[in-house]
Amino acid sequence: MTLDELKINSKDISLLMLEKLGERMPGGFFVYKAYGDEKLLYANDVVHDIFGCDNADEFKELTGFTFPGMVYGEDLERIEKSITEQVQEHFKKLDYVEYRIRRKDSEIRWVDDYGRLDHTEEFGDVFYVLIRDITELHNLRESLTDTDYLTTLYNRRHFDGELLKMITNIVNKGGRLCMIMIDIDKFKNFNDLYGHLVGDRCLTQVAAVMRKAITNKNFNLYRYGGEEFAVLLPDTALKEAALVAEEIRLAVRGIGIPHEEGPQGIVTISAGIAEITAEEARSLANPPSELIRLSDASLYEAKKSGRDTCRMNKMARCCSL
C-alpha cells in the first residue's frame, strides 16, 4: 500500500484507525502533527524496529514521540527546510527526504521517507509518512562518489585513485611523493564524553581548519576514514612535508576545542609523514600500500610518544622532527 492508495476521511480519523492502517503497511508508517510541536500520533512496529526498539515505550523514550526527536540533530534544520519547501511547492505531497537517525544502540542509520499533508477534524494538519532504512544503499552510493558527506573533503575512494595516479607518475617520470597520515587524538574518548553529535561537529571543524592550512600549498586533504585524514604531497621532500604537518598540527591546536581526556586538554592531532622516491617505487611490488604502511607506522610512533606531535619516516628509517 502506498500513501496515494490511502483513502482517509478526515472526519473519521482516529488513533484506532491509524493503528489499523499501520498494521496493513508493509513498511514503516508514522503520523505526526504538522507544525507546532510536531508530536507523533502513531508509529507502527516497523518504525520501532528501524530505531532498534523492542516496543512502543522504548521508541517513545528514545524520540520523545516527536518528529524532531526522530531526526539526527545535524540533519534536522536541513530536513525541516526541505519539508517546508516541498509543502509550499506541491501543497500536500512530500516527494522524498533523506536523513540520519540514531538508534537505541547509538548506531547511526540512514533513512528516507515520503509523505502527505492532510487536514483532520480531530488533530488538525498532520503528515502521513512512509519510512525505510536505506543505510546499505546510502553506503553503496557514497562508495561510488568522491566526496565525504560530513566534512565535504575528498573521501577514501578518491584518495586511492589519486595515490595510484601519483605513484604511477613518479614511476614513469621520476620524482618523489610524500604522504601525511593524521589522526585526531583520543577521539573515541571525545565521543564518549561529549556525544556523537558534538563529535561530528568536531570533525567538521578540524577538517575545515586543516584544509585552510594547506589551501595555499595546492595539496589535497582527504578523509581517510573515521577520525583519520590524509594529505598527498607530490614533488615534496620529506622535511618540507614535515613542516606542512606541523602547520596542520598547530592549526588544529589553535581552534581550542575542549577535550578533557586529550593530551593537552584540547582537541589535538598526531601525524605520521612518509616519503617514497621513484627509485623505491619502481622496486616495490605495491608502492601505494608501502607508502600507506610507512605513514601509518610514523603515526603510530607519534601516538606512542605522547600524541600531539608529528613523526616522519623514509622507508625503514623513522626519526623525530
Image (tube, rainbow, N blue to C red):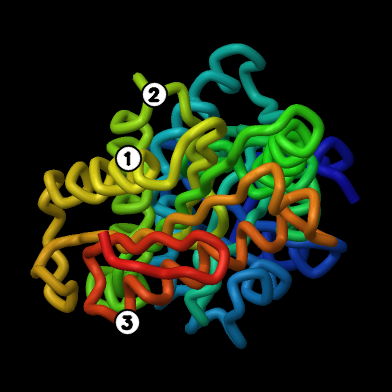
Contact between marks 2 and 1 (CB within 8 A): the answer is yes
Residue 95 image offset from top left, x and y in percent: 72, 29
Question: Which quarter shows the C terminus?
Answer: bottom left
Which residue position is annotated with label 3? Answer: 304
Give the amino acid type for the residue marked by disc 3 in the picture.
Lys
Give the amino acid type for the residue marked by disc 1 in the picture.
Val
Q: Residue placed at 13% from the left, 62% from the top?
A: 266
What whole-number distance in Å separates the C-alpha atoms at marks 3 and 2?
Answer: 29 Å
* Disc 3: CA contacts within 10 A as few (<14), some (14-19) or many (>=20): few
Q: Quadrant of residue 264?
A: bottom left
Residue toward you, 8 or 295:
295
Sequence-earlier tag: 3 or 1: 1
Which residue position is annotated with label 2? Answer: 217
* Disc 2: CA contacts within 10 A as few (<14), some (14-19) or many (>=20): few
The secondary structure type at the circle numbered 2 is helix
Q: Residue placed at 12% from the left, 74% from the top?
A: 260
What whole-number distance in Å separates the C-alpha atoms at marks 3 and 1?
Answer: 21 Å
Residue 143 image offset from top left, x and y in percent: 75, 48
Residue 230 image offset from top left, x and y in percent: 50, 49
Residue toward you, 273 or 203:
273
Give the amino acid type for the residue marked by disc 2 in the picture.
Lys
Q: Is residue 302 visible?
A: yes
Residue toward you, 103 or 69:
103
Residue 301 image offset from top left, x and y in percent: 37, 75
| Residue 151 in the figure: left or right of residue 119 | left
